[in-house]
Image: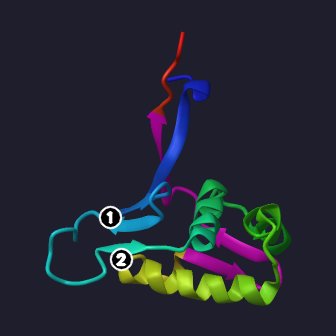
Amino acid sequence: MNDANRQVFGYFIHPDVQVDIVHNRIININAVGLSRGGNIITLRKTMMRLLAYLLENANGKVIQNDEILLNVWDKYELSSSTQRLWQVMQALRQRLNAVGIPNDFIIRVETKGFFIREGAVTPLYYKKTIEY
């Protein structure tokens, strides 16, 4: 499928978690239907933008703090700061942990940014409809 004909709608975090960008949810697909809580977690828009940005750029390189602040907060005319990034990141890690993603999935690189190991994330696409 040609890249021009497909759009990312989410991500799969190995081995069990689907990120649904459109509905701002993270889902442990192996736990859905079980009686324990934490199978499906809904995120606020900014937190989902942060997660989606990290996953989109999870290519084995450090994602700089300034780059994150610009693309998650500033572009949406929201007030950004490294303290706010830290707060939202802590809350995001708690929610990811609730669906079974270990705390070391997102690695903090002191004073620089964040890192996600290459190969831990698979983008999920849908095919765009071509209108004639």
Which sits earlier in the primary sequence, circle 2 or circle 1?
Answer: 1
Q: Tell me the residue at 70%/87% (across/down).
A: 86
The residue segment tinted magenta is: 106-126
In this view, the mark in front (2 or 1)? 2
Q: Tell me the residue at 28%/74% (across/down).
A: 39
User: Residue 118 appears in which quarter of the rendering?
Assistant: bottom right
Amino acid type, residue under disc 1 in the picture? Asp
Amino acid type, residue under disc 2 in the picture? Val
Tell me residue 50's x, y (percent). 64, 69
Secondary element at image label 2: loop
Name the one closer to the observer, 104 or 19.
19
Name the one closer to the observer, 118 or 75.
75
In the displayed image of the protein, which residue is found farthest to the top? 132
CA gap, disc 2 to disc 1? Answer: 9 Å
Where does label 2 land, which residue? 99
User: Residue 51 appears in which quarter of the rendering?
Assistant: bottom right
Name the one closer to the observer, 2 or 81.
81
Where does label 1 land, which residue? 16
Look at the image and say whether residue 105 sits in the magenta stretch.
no
| 42 with respect to 93 (left or right) | left
